[in-house]
Amino acid sequence: MSQQESRYTAARPSSLAQGWTLERLTSPSRLFGANGLRTGPDGRIYVAQVVGSQVSAVDVQAGQVQTVSAKGGDIIAPDDVAFDPHGNLVATEVMDGRVSVLGKDGRARVLRDDIPNANGITVHQGRLFINECRIGGRLMELDWNGGAPRVLLENIPMPNAMEVGPDGFLYFPVMGVNEIWRIKLEGGEPQKVAEGLGMPDAVKFDPKGFIVSTQVASGQVLRIDPRSGDRTLLAQLEPGLDNLTFVGDRLFVSSFTGQITEVLGNGETRALLPGALNWPLDLTVGDDGQLYVADGTHFYRLLPGGGLQTVGMMFSPGYPGYVRGVTAAGGGTFVVSTSNGQLSRYRPAQGETDVLAEGLDQVYGVAIAPDGAVLAAELGAGRVIRVQAGQVEVLASGLKTPTGVAVAPDGTAFVSEADGGRVSKLGRSGAEPFVEQLQTPRGLLVRDGQLYILDAGAKALISVDLQTKARQIIASELPVGAPAGVTPKPLRGIAPFSGPQGPLGGIAAGADGTLYVAADAEGSVIALRRAHA
C-alpha cells in the first residue's frame, strides 16, 4: 500500500521540445472520483472509486490518502464497501456484478459473481446484506461461504447505499421513486419512511438514531426522523453526492468529483479532499473562446485560475448521458458521444439534447466536417461513421480500436487506431495508414497544417506535418494512459446509465494556438504553448 498526494505518480518529469512550455490548468485529482464511503475499524474512511477500480483509505486528521486496492488489481469498479467481523473489506463491484472480500493480507476472493449492478452493502451483527441498483433490483442476504442468497425483496426501482437502523430494520433509498424504505431483516412488506426527496442515493444513521441521506440530484444532505419523516437540511452542496459515513459524530459525504466534504453543522462545511476532474475524456474550445471538458458524469467550463464550472451533469435536465467525445458546434451547441451509444447535439444553456444517432457500439471521438456532417469513431464496431440529416454512412470498417477522429479544413478525415498503433486517413476506398509505429494513439487534432496525436502508450504528444509527414515529439512523459506496469481491467458499464467505459485522451486548440490535453491519468487539464505564443 502506498501514500499519495496525487492518484498518479509519473516515472519521470515531462520533457518538452525546444520552444514549448507546459502548464497545468487544473490541479491533479487525489482520487478517481468518490463513491461508497465506510468508516473502517481503524477509524479511517475507506473510499470506493468506480471508474478507477480503486479503494483508498483517508486519514481524517492528517488528510493522508493510502491506496488499499490499486487500479489494475483484483477489485474492479468498486461502488460500495463494508467490513466483516474480522476487519476484512467487502466490496460490491457494480459493473462486473460481483461481491468480493479483500483480506487484511491484501488478497481478494470473489464471494459472488452473479449479482447484476451490485451496489449497496452493509454488515449487521455478522450478517451481510447487498442490493442491486437497477430497475427491478433485489435486496439480499449473502452467505459468507458462497451459498445461495436469501432474497428479502424483489422488483425494487434502484435501491442504493443502506444501513440497519437502531430499530433493527434495514433502511435503503429507492432512487427510482425518490423515496426511503425500510424492511425487516427477515423480509416481508417494505414500509415507506420518506418521499419527495432530491433523489436519495445513501442512507446511514447518526449517533442519535436519525437518518442522514445524501441527495444526488439536489446536492442536499438531509437529516430525517425515521418515526415522523420530518427532515432537516444539514448542508447544501453541489449535485452529484454519492454516499456518507460517520467518524464518531463527524459526518463526511462523497461526490462524483472525488470531493469528500465534512458537514460541520449550521450549514457549514469543509473539504477534507478537494474535488477535481474524475476522468477527463475529451475537451473542446467553444465559440466563446472558453475551454469545455467532458468528464463522464459532468460537463465543465474551465474558469480563469483553474476553477471548474459545472455546465451540466447526470440527473440535470437535458443531460445527454455519460459524455465521452465532444466538439463545439457553434451557438453554445456541442456534438457529444456518450457511453450509452448515442451521438447527440447538446445545448446545456437550454437543458436540451437532440439525438443524432443511437444504438452505436462504443462511440468515442467526434468531429464536424466542413459540410456540417458529424464523424465519429465507433470503437466496438471497428468503424468510422458519418451522420448527416438523420442518415448514417460507414466511411471505413475493419479498424483496430478506432478512438479519435479529426477533420482537416479540406474535408480530409483521420482516425486513430489505438490497438493498431497507427493513424489512418479516410478516402474513397476506406482507411489507409498515414502515421505508423505508434503505441496507443487516441486523441487527434488537425491545426495549421499539422496533425497532432496523443499517444497514450508512449505518453507523448506528437505533431506530423500533413504534407511532408515530418514528425516531432512535442511533449513526452505526459500523465496520460495507465501508470507504468498497470493494465486496467475493462469497465463494462452500469446499465441503464452507461455501456462499456474506457479512456479517450482528447486534444483541443485555442485561437492563439495553445494546445489543451486531457490528462486522464492524473485527472487534470494541461496547456502546451510555444514560447512565442
Image: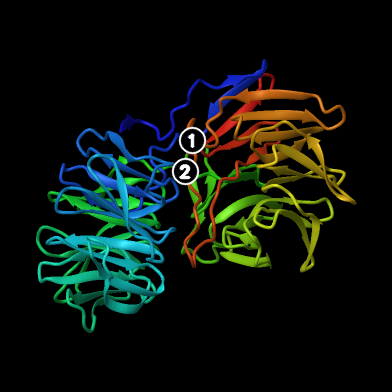
The answer to whether 323 is drawn above or below residue 529 in the figure is: below
Report the quarter where the N terminus lies.
top left
Residue bearing mark 2 = 277
Q: Is 146 situated left or right of 435 in this image?
A: left
Label 1 sits on what residue type? Thr
Between 496 and 269, which is closer to the camera in this rendering? 496
Q: Are marks 2 and 1 in contact (CB under 8 Å)?
A: yes
Q: Is residue 289 left or right of residue 318?
A: right
Q: Residue 33: image x %, image y %?
A: 40, 47
Asked if residue 109 is positioned above or below residue 307 in the image, the reply reads below
What is the CA distance from the residue labelled 2 to the residue labelled 1?
Answer: 8 Å
Identified by mark 2, the residue type is: Leu
The residue sitting at 80% across, 51% down in the picture is 369
Q: Position of residue 252 (x, y in %)?
A: 24, 50
Q: Residue furthest bottom?
A: 189
Q: Residue at x 82, y 32 (%)?
A: 449
**x and y, in percent, of residue 206 in the image:** 15, 59
Q: Earlier in the sequence, mark 2 or mark 1?
A: 1
Can I make out residue 178 in this image? no
Q: Residue at x 29, y 69 (%)?
A: 173
Q: Which mark is residue 26?
A: 1
Most extreme residue toward the right is 428
